[in-house]
Structure formats: structure tokens, C-alpha cells
Amino acid sequence: MTWWCSAQGVAWTWAWRPYPGVWLFVLAIMAWYAWRRRRWAIPVGAGRTAAFLSGVVVLWLASDWPVGTLGAGYLLSVHTLQYVLYSLAAPPLLLAGVPPRRVLAAAAASPGWRRAFRFAAHPLVALATFNLVLFVSHAPPVVDALRTSQAGSFVMDMAWLVGGLALWWPIFAPVPDVSRLTPPWKLGYLFVSTILPTVPSAFFVFADYPIYGLYELAPRVYDIPARSDQLVAGLTMKIAGDVAAWSAMIVIFFRWVRAEHDVDRRERAARAVAGAEG
């Protein structure tokens, strides 16, 4: 029984392949969220629920056939797409689905949790974790070794998810009790997060030969050359990664501007009332 996508060395076909491990993984996340919703003392809005479920759907699409199968053993470009989905698309949606007040309540109830949340929200810790996962999981010996087994491929996928959660935690953690970043710092943090991923993407684009033996020797899909596949992988990593970060930066910027406008409006209203009473 094949539980998780891994390199198999057989010719690619569009015949559907079942991966029960992927389904159990997705169902376990959904069951956890449903259980936590019942235990949380505050209602969870439809928007947060939709965000969390969207994140679960992204994880499912990244893990199951055909994306998971193609990425695990056929196309480096799809492997890179999986990385983007696991690290940059799913984590912000999953974190957005958790009510901030629940995080604050957990932090208030336990000094240990408060220290852990604040440590994880430190921008240097988050960036170090994210980039460490990025570079280690894309080292040729690691990819060539892990992708050939179901367990290894699962470990790589989960490492991407953990790295993504680490990256986005300082952005979605509540302010100021847990997060150390104000909106201007969040903008700078996200900009910095786009710099180091340029290194592996540049290797993919400018290398004169395929970097990974796994994808170089994999059965060809529609006769796509390994070098062309690697070029697309580099462009995918850079462009998709920048789109995710800059999209979040745009949202943060306009929310920041709106919040500042609301503060100014309340202050003007308060001064007008004080002037009228005087």
C-alpha cells in the first residue's frame, strides 16, 4: 500500500493513484479543528473557519495525486510548487483560522506557552527556521535521499509546513502580547524573507546541468527536458514566493493605513466634543 507520494521510477500516466495517508492527514487536521472549536469559549467566525479550511485544502492539493506524485518523483518544477504551497500558501491560511484571543488566553494561562509563543514570534528565530528548512530540504543529497521513500517524502513535506508556520507566525500572532512586530516592522520582515530564497532559485535558473539526480533520471513527463524543468522550478520558487510575500505586505499596509485613519478620526471627534463642552 502506498500511503504517501514518493519517487517510484515508473513511467508517468494520468491513471489515478490512491494515497490513504494523505487523506488521513487531512482528516486529522480537520478533526482537530472541529474539536478545538467546540472547546474554545468564544465563537469562531465564518471568515476564520473558511480561512482554515482553505489552508487544509491547499495542503491536500499539494500532497495528493497528481501534484504530490509529480513533485515526489517526476518534475522538479512541481516539487517546487509543493514547497510554495506548503510553506507560503497553507500556513497563513491555517494561522488566520485560529482566533487570536485563544492564543492570548493560552499565553495568559501558562507562562511556558507565553515564552514559547514570544520566542517563536521573534523575527530572527522565525527567519532562521524558515531559511534553514529551505536550504536543507533543497540540498541535493537530502532531496535525492528522502524523495525515494514514503517516510522521507513525508518528512520533507512536514518540514516545509513547519518552516512556513515559523515564517508566518510573527505576522499572525496577536499584538502586542505575543508578537514583537508592529505593522512597519512586519513589512520589513516580509521583504527580508524574500532575499535568501533567491539563492536556490538562482541555482536552479543558472545551473548548466541538472542539480538533482532524482529528477534528472526520472521518467520524462511529456518529454520535458530535466534542464528546462529545473529552470521553471527556479522561476516558480522566486516568483511565487515574492507574490505571496508582497500580497501579504499589501494587505498589512492598507490595514495599517486604515487603522491610523480610524485613530485620527476618533481623536478629532474627541477634540471636537471637548471643544463643544468647553
Image (spheres, rainbow, N blue to C red):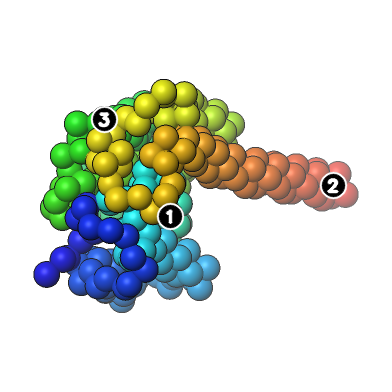
- Residue depicted at 16% across the width and 39% down the height: 145
Contact check, label 1 and label 3, Cβ < 8 Å: no
The answer to which of marks 2 and 3 sits earlier in the sequence is 3
Vertical position of residue 148 compared to residue 67: above or below = above
Identify which residue, 252 or 267, lies in the foreground. Answer: 252
C-alpha span from label 1 to label 2? 70 Å
Q: The residue under label 3 is which amino acid type?
A: Ala
Q: The residue under label 2 is which amino acid type?
A: Ala
Say which quadrant the N terminus sits in.
Answer: bottom left
Q: The residue under label 1 is which amino acid type?
A: Tyr
Say which quadrant the C terminus sits in.
Answer: top right
Relative horizontal placement of residue 272, taking residue 72 as reference (left or right): right
- Residue depicted at 60% across the width and 45% down the height: 247
**Quarter of the view holding residue 96:** bottom left
Q: Residue 45 location in percent, x, y?
A: 49, 71
Q: Secondary structure at mark 3?
A: loop
**Residue projecting furthest to the front:** 223
Relative horizontal placement of residue 36, taking residue 198 as reference (left or right): left
C-alpha span from label 1 to label 3? 26 Å
The tag on residue 272 is: 2
- List the residue tagged with mark 3: 139
Vertical position of residue 43 compared to residue 252: above or below = below
C-alpha span from label 2 to label 3? 63 Å
The answer to which of marks 1 and 2 sits earlier in the sequence is 1
Q: Is residue 224 visible?
A: yes
Front tag of 1 and 2: 1
